Image (cartoon, rainbow, N blue to C red):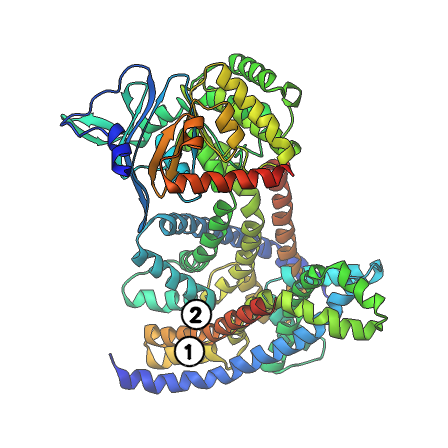
């Protein structure tokens, strides 16, 4: 076990996690903020709203993430908007993650019983107040497990950003393989970095699920 | 004492097991069964004669259901023997020694014992007719015409021939259970095992199932019934067997057990079940 | 602005690459399913040691990226003297990664069938094979068909990564054309449409499958 080698290169790899986490966090924040109103909108009766949203969701989930990434990085460039790798990646990731979160939040909305709306209305609560104080907390509670599972997927997927030269973990690892000629060690360490990051998320998920169970 | 009762029926352990006397359809000898560290059956022996109706009663956890499931080897007993109509079912003879029977042989004998479950266990994706003819055709190799005719006759007997094309989930609990009885009868079993057949039913539906079971008993079917229905035990059963904590505490005709129980636990159990019976009738 | 000529010239090659994508997906699903079934069976019956090993493997597959696994096979195997074509490496990587998911899906299907069903079938003396084909599977398949198909959809999308390790599938070929033509949109649009079409085929197959194994409820 060449510990010196491992330690030295591990430190280089770790620098990549900065971008991995940046991409992941930015995506989660943006996608969540976009998906919530979209989910609410698609829950209404108005077809004019539902169909475009449904079409977007179908396309964003059916087209491979790498293709969407290429659209944002190369495709937009053709239209005159040249983006740096990281912004392009954030855009692409937001596009497809929003679609997934959209589905998750819609499921959460469906899970809130009709009686909740009736009860709020009977109390005379205004629409914004009802959504914010009554409906939204319950949606989040119901959707929490699926949401966190998706968050883990997003973090895993950040590795594809390496293909458009975002200097995150996988990209760094790839370059190091050429330099060190030791693919097993480098890639194993890279893999473990992802495992650890996602394990933390899974731990968080289990913690939240336990606390939610206690509340209900 | 407990040991007296058990030794009355337990064989003293000859080198080679004796066949049971003629007329005994089901002979369970010192059945022992544990689930992990929990010992559920601690050496239970029971003989059921042809045409007898036995009611098996006792508190939950006493091992009644496990005993039934050991009889047709849905659970493999850890020790003891099971004889069906003079044949040793639980073991086979190889090279002059006894060894546990294999799945293939057990299957063959299971077909001779009909079982009716607390949760009916009808196949939901098959119609009533298909439920009943499935085993006779695939196990007994009857032709479809013969199997369908038998199904019709049995459904006629339990009063559900008009539901022959229906699906289980379209029927009430009582109807499903009667179909389940017909399905078990379609295999022309030598003995019928009932595992709390009415426990999962709404009170109004219990009567129709008990009625069917009564009719079967009157026709001379050998039945071993685990039940909480004391009326049934009193009116239909020839013998009542009380089990507690993995052993048979006492057995005998209902009157004897009811009026002169030998054990304190029997008395307490009977009191409590008659109490809850009265509660229900209110 | 949009140059249809480029689309038309490159379409035949893209379609040929699509065939490769379909092959890649099918082989990966096959490997993943076989692995999943084997693991589900092992998990049900065997030793706690094996169960723990399987749990660790599952955990790694759920938390580690597919791309890293593919690179691992692509760069790593030649170093130990194993030279496999990129296509097989991709199937291997995808199959092993998805095996964990298939295992969960199959266990879910089997667990969905109440134990009493097997009891009743066995009590009637039915042959174990018939118990499976007549009683258990018809009830399990409607349960695990939807997750099975959605997992297949995920594998279809995952196949797009194989281009990175030089498999001539749709995305890889598309990427090459982008750098050749400098017209990404003209390449990416047809590619996206093809993927969406393949996806729709899967959805249609699922609907047909559900109708075939329909449990009347």
User: Between B225 and A119, which is closer to the camera in this rendering?
Assistant: B225
Res. B159 image quadrant: top right
**Relative image position of residue C131 (x, y in whole percent):** 45, 33
Is B10 placed left or right of B259 in the picture?
left
Tell me which residue sits at (72%, 75%) in the image.
Answer: A79
Q: Which residue is mark 1?
A: A173
User: Between B22 and B91, which is closer to the camera in this rendering?
Assistant: B22
Up-down relation of residue A22 to residue C129 (above or below): below
Decide: few, some or many residues near mark 2? Use Cα within 10 Å; few <14, some 14-19, many ≥20: many
Quadrant position of the C terminus of chain A in the picture: bottom right
Up-down relation of residue C154 to residue C114 (above or below): below
Tell me which residue sits at (63%, 81%) in the image.
Answer: A87
Q: Secondary structure at mark 1?
A: helix
Q: Chain of mark 1?
A: A
Up-down relation of residue B15 to residue C71 (above or below): above
Q: Secondary structure at mark 2?
A: helix
**Relative image position of residue B32 (x, y in whole percent):** 28, 39
Is B191 placed left or right of C50 in the picture?
right
User: Between B30 and C180, which is closer to the camera in this rendering?
Assistant: B30
Q: Which residue is mark 2?
A: C68
- Distance, label 2 to label 1, CA atoms, is 9 Å
């Amino acid at each position: 076990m060449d510990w010196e080698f491992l330690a030295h290169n591990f430190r280089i790899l770790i620098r990549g996690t900065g971008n991995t986490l940046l991409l992941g966090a930015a995506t989660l924040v943006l996608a969540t903020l976009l998906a919530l109103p979209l989910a609410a909108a698609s829950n209404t009766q108005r077809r004019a709203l539902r169909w475009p949203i449904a079409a977007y969701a179908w396309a964003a989930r059916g087209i491979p993430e790498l293709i969407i990434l290429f659209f944002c990085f190369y495709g937009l460039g053709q239209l005159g908007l040249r983006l740096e790798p990281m912004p392009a990646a954030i855009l692409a990731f937001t596009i497809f993650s929003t679609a997934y979160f959209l589905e998750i939040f819609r499921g959460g909305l469906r899970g809130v019983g009709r009686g909740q709306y009736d009860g709020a209305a009977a109390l005379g609560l205004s629409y914004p107040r009802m959504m914010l104080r009554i409906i939204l907390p319950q949606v989040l509670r119901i959707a929490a497990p699926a949401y966190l599972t998706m968050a883990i997927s997003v973090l895993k997927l950040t590795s594809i950003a390496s293909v458009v030269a975002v200097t995150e973990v996988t990209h760094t690892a790839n370059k190091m393989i050429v330099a060190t000629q030791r693919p097993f060690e480098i890639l194993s360490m890279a893999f473990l970095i992802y495992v650890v990051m996602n394990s933390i998320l899974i731990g968080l998920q289990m913690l939240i699920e336990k606390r939610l169970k206690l509340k209900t | 004492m407990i040991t007296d009762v058990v030794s009355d029926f337990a064989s003293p352990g000859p080198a080679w097991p004796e066949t049971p006397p003629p007329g005994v359809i089901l002979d369970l000898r010192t059945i022992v069964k544990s689930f992990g560290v929990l010992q559920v059956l601690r050496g239970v022996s029971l003989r059921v004669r042809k045409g007898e109706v036995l009611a098996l009663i006792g508190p939950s956890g006493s091992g009644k259901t496990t005993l039934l499931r050991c009889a047709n080897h849905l659970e493999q007993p850890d020790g003891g023997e099971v004889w069906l109509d003079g044949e040793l079912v639980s073991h086979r003879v190889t090279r002059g020694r006894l060894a546990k029977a294999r799945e293939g042989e057990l299957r063959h004998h299971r077909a001779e014992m009909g079982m009716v479950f607390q949760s009916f266990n009808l196949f939901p994706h098959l119609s009533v007719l298909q439920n009943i003819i499935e085993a006779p055709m695939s196990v007994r190799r009857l032709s479809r015409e013969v199997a369908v005719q038998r199904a019709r006759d049995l459904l006629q007997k339990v009063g559900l021939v008009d539901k022959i094309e229906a699906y289980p989930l379209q029927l009430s609990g009582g109807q499903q259970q009667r179909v389940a009885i017909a399905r078990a009868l379609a295999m022309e079993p030598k003995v019928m095992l009932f595992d709390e057949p009415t426990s999962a039913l709404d009170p109004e539906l219990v009567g129709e199932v008990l009625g069917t079971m009564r009719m079967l008993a009157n026709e001379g079917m050998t039945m071993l019934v685990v039940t909480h229905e004391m009326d049934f035990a009193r009116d239909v059963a020839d013998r009542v067997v009380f089990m507690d904590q993995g052993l048979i505490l006492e057995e005998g005709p209902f009157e004897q057990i009811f009026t002169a129980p030998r054990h304190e636990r029997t008395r307490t159990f009977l009191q409590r079940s008659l109490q809850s019976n009265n509660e229900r009738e209110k | 602005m949009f140059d249809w000529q480029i689309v038309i010239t490159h379409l035949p090659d893209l379609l040929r690459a699509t065939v490769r994508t379909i092959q890649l997906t099918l082989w990966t699903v096959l490997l993943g399913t076989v692995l999943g079934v084997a693991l589900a069976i092992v998990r049900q019956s065997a030793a706690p040691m094996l169960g723990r090993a399987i749990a660790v493997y599952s955990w790694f597959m759920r938390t580690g990226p597919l791309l890293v696994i593919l690179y691992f096979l692509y760069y790593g195997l030649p170093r130990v003297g194993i030279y496999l074509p990129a296509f097989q490496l991709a199937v291997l990587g995808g199959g092993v990664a998805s095996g964990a998911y298939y295992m969960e899906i199959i266990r879910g299907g089997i667990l969905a069938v109440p134990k009493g069903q097997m009891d009743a079938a066995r009590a009637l003396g039915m042959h174990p094979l018939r118990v499976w084909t007549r009683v258990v599977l018809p009830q399990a398949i409607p349960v695990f068909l939807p997750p099975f198909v959605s997992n297949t959809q995920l594998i279809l999308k995952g196949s797009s990564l194989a281009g990175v390790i030089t498999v001539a599938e749709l995305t890889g070929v598309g990427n090459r054309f982008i750098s050749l033509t400098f017209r990404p949109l003209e390449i990416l649009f047809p590619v996206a449409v093809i993927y969406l079409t393949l996806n729709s085929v899967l959805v249609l197959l699922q609907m047909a499958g559900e109708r075939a194994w329909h449990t009347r409820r």
